[in-house]
Image: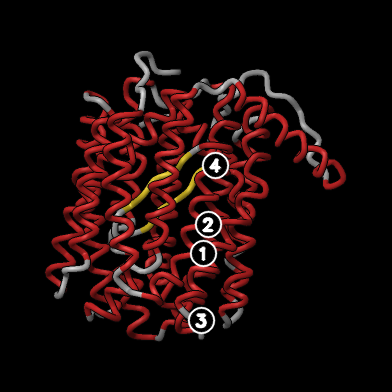
């Protein structure tokens, strides 16, 4: 843990104390503001759609001008978007805030590329695991605090205060990143990023991405398609884990926060050892087996009837997550050359899934899949509140088997 990896991990530690309070309860907040199940899915989908617009531009800037300024400036803009829901009280304005927030996440390819650049190839499993496990330690108590605030001062007052606090924390993180991160792009070009040049630059970014994709090996397409497919099906259930827990199983908001606390503890304890194992064995085999196990775990969620059942399942799913996501990230980093990493990650970056938490799409392909899944999620849950998990369970079983059979793991990892 040194250099850029240390700086990004420290920032993530601070960030998790805020974001882990908000995200677990966001679907409940939408319902409180008068939204429906369908509204939850639409809000999440619209936000994702906004992210896709500028994602190729983020990868283009990251590869040619560098990673650092883009990461720092857009971190500040990301935090500034929190002010919209902080001062409003309707699901429509919450949707606007999430749209703006998602629009500026085109710096994520630069963030992913910077971390991949800064971790030696033979340590990527443990490196990616550490960047998740250590921040998780700082965010362990966040869901419990969020649940306590909601139960004691009401969800509206709690969310307003948390969003406002998020703005100040994100602003501080942006300054810290700008000051201490070190550029990994050699001989960066100077791009004209003025508003008048932005449309032309965006067009050039899309052209550059497509030209890079022509040179991308087939095995990377296979990896991206399988990971993105898992993101699609995980997104169908992602916003409704907490909704089912409170409405059907009967957990309180504070009890769900404690479930996330247990999940965080397990993630911290097992995250780094799991990453070390990923480095020593076949990444595709580990990821495939984890998806097959995750299939059974998603089905078991439909059989949970008590708080204890949910807690025990959270422990098991977190163990699965601890192996699966570092495997995904390491495989992408191993297959993509450094000089193309930003643009490739911006286009077919895949993403990852966290059972009992959600999914995230990375790159246009992964985010398109996530958007589709979120758009369908509310309608599927309304039709039958068990269907999202039936669909996810079946999909993970099939994708896990295909992962083992089809992914071609590189013998020599890219630097």
The residue labelled by disc 2 is 371
Disc nearer the start of the sequence (2/3) = 3
Which residue is located at x 50 percent, y 45 percent? 366
Cβ–Cβ under 8 Å for marks 2 and 1: yes
Q: Residues within 10 Å of mark 1 (few under 14, many from 20)?
A: many
Pinpoint residue 200: horizontal percent, then vertical percent.
82, 39
Pinpoint residue 339: horizontal percent, then vertical percent.
58, 21
Which residue is located at x 54 percent, y 53 percent? 172
Q: Residues within 10 Å of mark 4 (few under 14, many from 20)?
A: many
Give residue 35's mark: 3
The residue labelled by disc 4 is 363
Which residue is located at x 24 percent, y 31 percent? 285
The secondary structure type at the circle numbered 2 is: helix
The residue labelled by disc 1 is 375
- Cα–Cα span, label 4 and label 2: 12 Å
Question: Could you say which quadrant of the image residue 383 lies in?
Answer: bottom left
- Cα–Cα span, label 4 and label 1: 18 Å
Colour scheme in use: secondary structure
């Amino acid at each position: 843990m040194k250099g850029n990896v240390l700086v990004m991990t420290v920032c993530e530690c601070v960030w998790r104390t805020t974001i882990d309070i908000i995200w677990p309860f966001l679907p409940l907040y939408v319902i409180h503001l008068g939204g429906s199940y369908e509204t939850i899915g639409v809000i999440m989908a619209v936000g994702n759609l906004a992210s896709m617009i500028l994602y190729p531009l983020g990868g283009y800037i990251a590869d040619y001008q560098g990673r650092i300024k883009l990461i720092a400036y857009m971190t500040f803009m990301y935090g500034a978007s929190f002010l919209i829901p902080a001062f409003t009280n309707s699901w429509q304005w919450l949707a606007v805030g999430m749209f703006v927030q998602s629009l500026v996440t085109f710096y994520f390819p630069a963030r992913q590329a910077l971390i991949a650049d800064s971790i030696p190839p033979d340590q990527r499993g443990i490196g990616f695991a550490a960047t998740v496990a250590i921040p998780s330690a700082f965010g362990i108590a966040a869901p419990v605090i969020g649940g306590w605030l909601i139960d004691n001062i009401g969800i509206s007052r709690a969310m307003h205060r948390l969003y406002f606090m998020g703005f100040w924390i994100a602003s501080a993180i942006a300054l810290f990143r700008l000051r201490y991160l070190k550029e990994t792009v050699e001989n960066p070009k100077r791009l004209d990023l003025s508003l008048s040049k932005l449309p032309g630059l965006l067009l050039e970014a899309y052209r550059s991405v497509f030209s890079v994709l022509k040179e991308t090996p087939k095995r990377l397409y296979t990896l991206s398609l399988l990971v993105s497919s898992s993101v699609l099906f995980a997104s169908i259930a992602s916003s409704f884990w907490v909704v089912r827990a409170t409405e059907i199983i009967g957990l309180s908001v504070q009890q769900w926060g404690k479930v996330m606390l247990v999940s965080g503890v397990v993630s911290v304890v097992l995250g780094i050892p799991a990453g070390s194992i990923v480095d020593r064995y076949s990444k595709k085999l580990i990821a495939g087996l984890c998806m097959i196990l995750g299939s059974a775990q998603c089905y078991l969620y439909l059989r949970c009837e008590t708080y204890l059942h949910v807690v025990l399942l959270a422990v098991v799913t977190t163990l699965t997550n601890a192996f699966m996501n570092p495997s995904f990230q390491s495989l992408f980093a191993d297959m993509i050359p450094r000089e193309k990493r930003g643009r490739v990650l911006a286009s077919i970056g895949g993403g990852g899934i966290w059972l009992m938490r959600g999914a995230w799409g990375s790159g246009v392909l992964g985010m398109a899949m996530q958007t589709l899944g979120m758009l369908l999620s509310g309608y599927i849950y309304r039709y039958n509140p068990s269907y999202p998990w039936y669909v996810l369970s079946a999909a993970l079983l099939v994708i896990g088997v295909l992962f083992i059979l089809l992914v071609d793991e590189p013998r020599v990892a890219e630097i």
